[in-house]
Image (cartoon, helix red, strand yellow):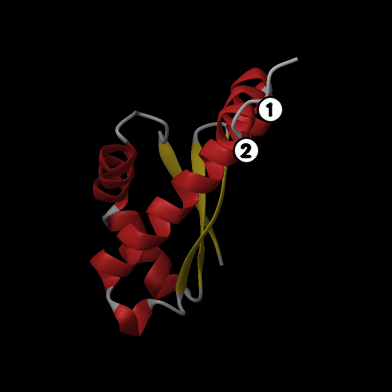
Amino acid sequence: MPLSFLGDTLKNRIAAQTPLKKQLQASRIVECAKELLLEMFGKEQERNIAALFLKNRTLTISCANSAVAQEVRLRQQEIVNGVNAKIGKNEVDRIRYLL
């Protein structure tokens, strides 16, 4: 059995394991959403808004109060389009808000 590079082996294992690949992709989407929210709402709102997780193409965002949730709701389509543009695919369809 020939030796192979660790990076190649991990890449092949991740490609073969669909659930792991989906989890990694969801994690990447949440990180992109966090970056986008920071860009859109600024440093002062960073503690009031947090992207939590992605499930069934729905991005869940935690909002500290109803005013912040309303602002996110008004910019929902802009957030969805921005996240999809950052990752290069249409992976997010809508946003769910948690207060």
Amino acid type at circle 2 is: Gln
Residue ID at (68%, 27%) = 19
Are dots 1 and 2 in contact, CB under 8 Å? yes
> Quick check: 63 left or right of 18?
left
Q: Position of residue 23 (x, y in %)?
A: 62, 38
Residue 1 in the image: x percent, y percent? 75, 15
Q: Where is 35 relative to 59, above or below?
A: below
Quadrant where the C terminus is found in the figure: bottom right
Q: Position of residue 71 (x, y in %)?
A: 31, 65
Which residue is nearer to you in this view: 95 or 12? 12
Towards the viewer: 29 or 51: 29
Tell me: residue 86, above or below residue 39. Answer: above
Give the quadrant of residue 44: bottom left
Q: Residue at x 29, y 44 (%)?
A: 86
**How many numbered tags mark residues here?**
2
Q: Which residue is mark 1?
A: 19
Q: Is residue 58 left or right of residue 70?
A: right
Q: Is residue 83 left or right of residue 91?
A: left
- Along the viewing direction, whichever of 88 and 55 lies nearer the viewer: 88
- Which residue of the protein is positioned furthest toward the right in this rendering? 1
* Residue that extends furthest to the top in the rendered view of this protein: 1
Q: Residues within 10 Å of mark 1 (few under 14, many from 20)?
A: few
- Residue placed under numbered mark 2 in the picture: 23
Q: Is residue 18 above or below residue 97?
A: above
Q: Residue at x 33, y 45 (%)?
A: 83
What residue is at 48 percent from the left and 46 percent from the top? 28
Helix, strand or loop for disc 2: helix
User: How would you rate the neighbour count of disc 2 (Cα within 10 Å): few for under 14, some for 14-19, many for 20 or more?
Assistant: few
Label 1 secondary element: helix
Give the answer, above or below, for where 4 lies relative to 41: above
Kind of residue indicated by mark 1: Pro
Residue 14 on image: x %, y %: 63, 28
